[in-house]
Image (cartoon, rainbow, N blue to C red):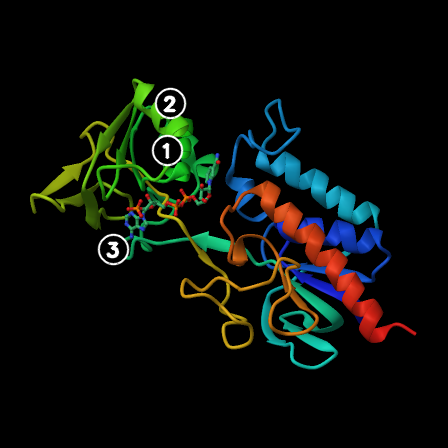
């Protein structure tokens, strides 16, 4: 069977595409390798998605998006896409569950957290090193936590972690924050938050659990070791150093910018006819749920138009 559209990725962009495509009566398949929702599932409070006023969690919002896709008849498959053949009229999507074919494809694979690339980071992930406050903050109830990064995510998630941790220290590599002024002001006012500027982690220390780290001050060159309190035995290191686009499947197929994001026009079209991109994976100025869902809607409407024009009777 050949689908009208295969959507790769079930974050807000992919789910919005699925909803619009299925509602337009396109034969729609959404493929996701992990859990639905992407990055938004790690957010406890989606405060700036229009209409989500009271305590809307990422997982709750995603659950409703999935329900809407299902209600309109989109099919969903949990599988890992291994290879894409996109050049011909019928696009081939090779997965660990078999080959799927479609007249159009929407790339909505999103982005993943950037690693610091320091010794022991991978080995101690899940053992004190985390990239998701909603997932892991409560493990650090009453303990000390260090947050790396100076963007909106670092400060917002740092604020969230203060609900659990004894103290949250933000370590930023510069002396001014990239985060929005309002968020910076809120963080500065929180008595549980502290800040270390112009500094970065050189190495994470610990045998089985994060017990400390080596910190370098980039301005003075001073290097010091910070260890967990003896009574605690562990500290938390939450890394929010931005995101990297998940474009490894398509980096030789569609045009990317220097940072690796997919280039599209305003109709979400890539350089390959019938191949669209939506959400955090594409070049854009604002990566939010609201812009991801808007991209998804446009991509689906354009995919429908493309399929009609190229395959219609
Ligand atoms: P971001 O804006 O790219 O910020 C990443 C931060 O990590 C920057 O402060 C950067 O430092 C630092 N960093 C990058 N690489 C590093 C490294 N190797 N070592 C140490 N620090 C490093 O990422 P984000 O905060 O995750 O935000 C991503 C997007 O989502 C943004 O567009 C943001 O506005 C949006 N967002 C919005 C909200 C909201 O509106 N409520 C909430 C969360 C995220 P430099 O500043 O020196 O580059």
Q: CA distance from mark 1 to mark 2?
A: 9 Å
> From this viewpoint, is residue 304 visible?
yes
Circle 2 crowding by C-alpha within 10 Å: few under 14, some 14–19, many from 20: few
Q: Nearer the viewer, residue 186 or 205?
A: 186
Q: Tell me whether the residue at label 3 lies in contact with that at label 1, contact meaning CB atoms closer than 8 angstroms.
A: no
Ligand 1 picture quarter: top left
239 sits to left or right of 59: left
**At 31% from the left edge and 55% from the top edge, which residue is drawn?**
123
Q: Is residue 36 visible?
A: no
Q: Where is residue 276 shown, x and y percent of the image?
A: 65, 64
**Residue position for label 2:** 186
Q: Secondary structure at mark 1?
A: helix
Q: Kindly report which numbered mark, 3 or 2, lies closer to the viewer in this rendering.
A: 2
Vertical placement of 97 versus 175: above or below? below
On the image, numbered disc 3 is attached to which residue? 118
In the image, residue 100 sits, relative to residue 259, either above or below, namely below
Q: Check disc 3: other Cα within 10 Å, few if <14, some if 14-19, many if 20+.
A: few
Residue at position x 57%, y 59% in the image: 109
Earlier-in-chain disc, 3 versus 2? 3
Mark sitting earlier along the chain (1/2): 1
Determine whether the beta carbon of the residue marked 1 sits less than 8 angstroms from the nearest atom of ligand 1: yes
State the image quarter where residue 1 is shown.
bottom right
- Residue at (84, 54) in percent of width and height: 24
Give the label on residue 155, or none: 1
- Counting from the top left corner in percent of width and height, residue 116 is at 30, 53
Q: Is residue 291 above or below residue 146?
A: below
Lateral position of residue 190 relative to residue 105, left or right:
left
Helix, strand or loop at label 3? It is loop
């Amino acid at each position: 069977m050949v689908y009208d559209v295969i959507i790769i990725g079930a974050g807000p962009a992919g789910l919005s595409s699925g909803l619009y495509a299925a509602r337009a009566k396109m034969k729609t398949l959404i493929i996701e390798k992990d859990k639905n929702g992407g990055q938004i599932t790690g957010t406890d409070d989606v405060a700036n998605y229009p209409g989500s006023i009271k305590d809307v969690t990422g997982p709750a919002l995603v659950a409703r998006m999935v329900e809407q896709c299902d209600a309109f008849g989109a099919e969903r498959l949990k599988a890992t896409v291994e290879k894409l053949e996109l050049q011909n009229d019928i696009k081939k999507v090779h997965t660990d569950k078999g080959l799927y074919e479609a007249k159009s494809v929407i790339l909505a694979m999103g982005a993943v957290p950037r690693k610091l690339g320091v010794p022991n980071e991978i080995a101690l992930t899940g053992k004190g090193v985390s990239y998701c406050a909603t997932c892991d903050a409560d493990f650090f109830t009453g303990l000390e936590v260090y947050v790396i990064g100076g963007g909106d995510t670092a400060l917002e998630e740092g604020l969230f972690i203060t609900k659990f941790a004894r103290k949250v220290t933000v370590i930023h590599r510069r002396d001014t924050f990239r985060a929005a002024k309002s968020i910076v002001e809120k963080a500065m006012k929180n008595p549980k938050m502290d800040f270390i500027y112009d500094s970065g982690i050189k190495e994470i220390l610990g045998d089985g659990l994060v017990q400390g780290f080596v910190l370098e001050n980039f301005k003075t060159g001073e290097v010091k070791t910070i260890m967990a309190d003896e009574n605690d035995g562990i500290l938390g290191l939450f890394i929010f150093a931005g995101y990297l686009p998940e474009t490894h499947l398509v980096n030789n197929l569609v045009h990317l910018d220097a940072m690796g994001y997919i280039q599209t026009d305003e109709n979400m079209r890539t350089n390959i006819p019938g191949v669209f991109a939506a959400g955090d994976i594409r070049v854009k100025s604002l990566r939010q749920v609201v812009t991801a869902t808007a991209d998804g809607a446009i991509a689906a409407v354009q995919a429908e138009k493309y399929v009609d024009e190229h395959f219609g009777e």
